[in-house]
Amino acid sequence: MSIIQKIDETVKKYNMLSKGDRVAVGVSGGKDSMLLLYYLLKRREELKLELTVMNVEHGIRGEESLRDTEFVKAFCEENSIDFRCLKINAPLGAKEAGVGVEEYSRNKRYEFFESVNADKIATAHSLSDNVETVIFRLARGTSLNGFKGIPPVRGNIIRPLIECSAEDIVTACGELGIPYVTDETNSDNAYTRNGIRNEVMPLLKSVNPQAENAISRFIASTAEVDDFITETAKKYVDSVLSVNDIKPLHPAVLKRVIELYAENFGVVLDELHLNSVIELLNKNGRTQIKGRLFAFSNNETLYFSRYDKAETSFVTESMTKDISEYKKYIDEFTFYCDGDKVKGKVYVRHRADGDSVTPVGRGCTKTLKKLFNELRVPVTKRTSIPVICDEEGVIGVLGYATDERVKIDNNTVSVFLLKINTEDCI
């Protein structure tokens, strides 16, 4: 089977191309991208493809890099292909962005690809690239999802060479007379991927000459298992997660449920945050995910929500009335207590760490956290509940408790009445 036929099978298997597609092709001038461009040229007339070559000059290799761009441009002119080039200074840009050069360059490439009005974006990732990516992720730490490697199709991005090895590509370029340039930085093992390609892979091939194909089969099997887990998990993902429904699930499915739920908030959970969310299934509480995004559990549901500790402010007014006439004011005011038992000034604030109260009639002191847990007060609501204090401590929690110290009893002479309104902060 020729390599063109092999690519045809991949394209057909993953439904990569349709008649009349406008295809943006990432071309560096190297052997992989030139084989990809050669293939698309072979199928251009048959499929009525409209091709645009996208070339990025990274500003890393000086004259050599400019030479590569001119090579690709000349090839496009000879074959009547629309050519576009983006010039960047990858080392400087990466430093300013605080990321690695490889990551910065990759991000810029895809931004460039997305800037054109194309139905498909074709990149030259090969089977060897896929294997190297999985080894890289394994060394760095990854979930099952990471072992799926580089997907043949992701959205409108297609990878027709994903089942062709580097050896296949070198052989094909020689046999078909496909011109290409060589990037000298490919031999520089300071780049992590080059180290895997030039040092790790030869060692693996000394164990098994077909190591790439063996790892590729593992990637395919992993993708099947991962897809099954994902499809199973999707059945449990809703606007909130039912603790009773998801808690008994197999750990692999449970983790995927939470990962998929997190994706709805634009978050990819690492192992640390994933495990902290799973721990919430056994308690009433919260854990921070990222910034103001928290995961909350109330023993029945698990959900994510934006959380602001200063979400409300309070407006108050107060008065003190003789015990004989205070009852006619009760409906108008939201909190009342024995006015003579209040120590100094009264103020209203949000809950603070360590706050406690001795609710009337309970005979014991509780932290507000424990009180709210017992009363099943939603975690997201707790910091917006007004806490009433005098100069000695908490005298009440609006709607939930009055402290024993200031309760009204048979000896009460005057009653302190407090009206509290909450207002959203701007």
Image: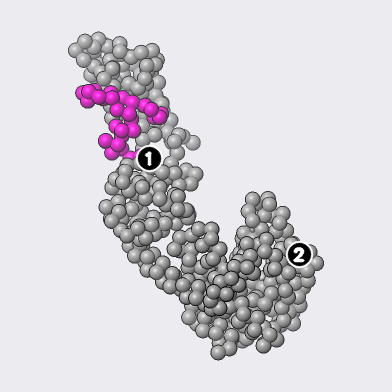
Report which residue position mark 2 lands on: 61
Between 395 and 356, the one nearer to me in the picture: 356
What residue is drawn where x is 41% and y is 26%?
349
Query: From mark 1 to mark 2, how far is it between C-alphas?
Result: 54 Å
The residue furthest left is 410
Residue 148, x across and y down, in percent: 48, 68
- Is residue 379 one of those drawn in magenta? yes
How are the residues colored? one colour
Instruction: State which region is magenta.
Output: 351-380
- Displayed quadrant of residue 407: top left
**Left or right placement of residue 28 versus residue 268 in this view:** right
Secondary structure at badge 1 equals: helix
Report which residue position mark 1 lands on: 380
Between 161 and 109, the one nearer to me in the picture: 161
Residue 254, x across and y down, in percent: 35, 57
On screen, 69 above or below 138? Answer: below
Sequence-first disc among 1 and 2: 2
Residue 114, x across and y down, in percent: 60, 65
Mark 1 Cα-neighbour bin, 10 Å: few <14, some 14–19, many ≥20:
some
On screen, 325 above or below 283? Answer: above
Residue type indicated by callout 2:
Arg
- Displayed quadrant of residue 84: bottom right
What residue is drawn where x is 35% and y is 41%?
285
Between 390 and 223, the one nearer to me in the picture: 223
Secondary structure at badge 2 equals: loop
**Left or right placement of residue 400 versus residue 100 in this view:** left
On screen, 99 above or below 234? Answer: above
Residue 52, x across and y down, in percent: 65, 74
Residue type indicated by callout 1:
Thr
